[in-house]
Image (tube, rainbow, N blue to C red):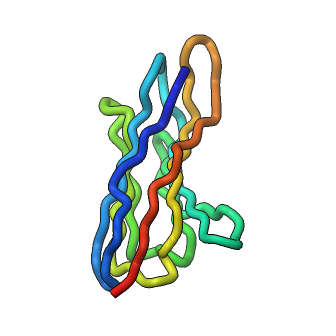
Amino acid sequence: QVQLVESGGSLVQPGGSLRLSCVAEGSIFSIGPMAWYRQSPGKQRELVAKMPVSLMPEYADFVKGRFAISRDDAKKSVFLQMNSVTSEDTASYYCNMIVMGGGVIGDYWGQGTQVTVSS
């Protein structure tokens, strides 16, 4: 069984920075694309950034130039560096990975980490 464990969410002031982390645990052979999504109350979950295995990262327009996604395959981890945050970035952030392990390819999600932007 594979689990994704997120950390790093907190209260941050407008204009501040935050770094989210997500690590995959369990029986893992390899990891494909990794991504971060977010969801605010009353809104649908939306893609923030995705990191393919060997291609350039892709970003939603609303975070371009402010957020950066990175991955460390040796540590089975994905990160989201958030800079110049605004109140619009307040949401629960979820990591997502396509993981091959135990002969199965699965689409896994973290439990969510809350980011609140407020003064």
Position of 21 with respect to 32 (left or right) is left
Q: Is residue 73 above or below residue 63?
A: above
Q: Is residue 102 above or below residue 78?
A: above
Residue at 40% from the left image edge and 57% from the top image edge: 69
- Where does the image place residue 62, in percent across and percent down from the top left? 54, 78
Front position in the image: 4 or 60: 4
**Quarter of the view holding residue 75:** top left
- Where does the image place residue 82, in percent across and percent down from the top left? 36, 68
> In this figure, what is the number of numbered marks?
0
Among all residues in the image, which is located at the extreme top? 103
Q: Is residue 65 above or below residue 18?
A: below
Front position in the image: 102 or 41: 41
**Quarter of the view holding residue 42:** bottom right
Front position in the image: 96 or 6: 6
- Where does the image place residue 80, in percent across and percent down from the top left? 38, 58
Residue at 38% from the left image edge and 79% from the top image edge: 85
- Where does the image place residue 27, in percent across and percent down from the top left? 47, 17
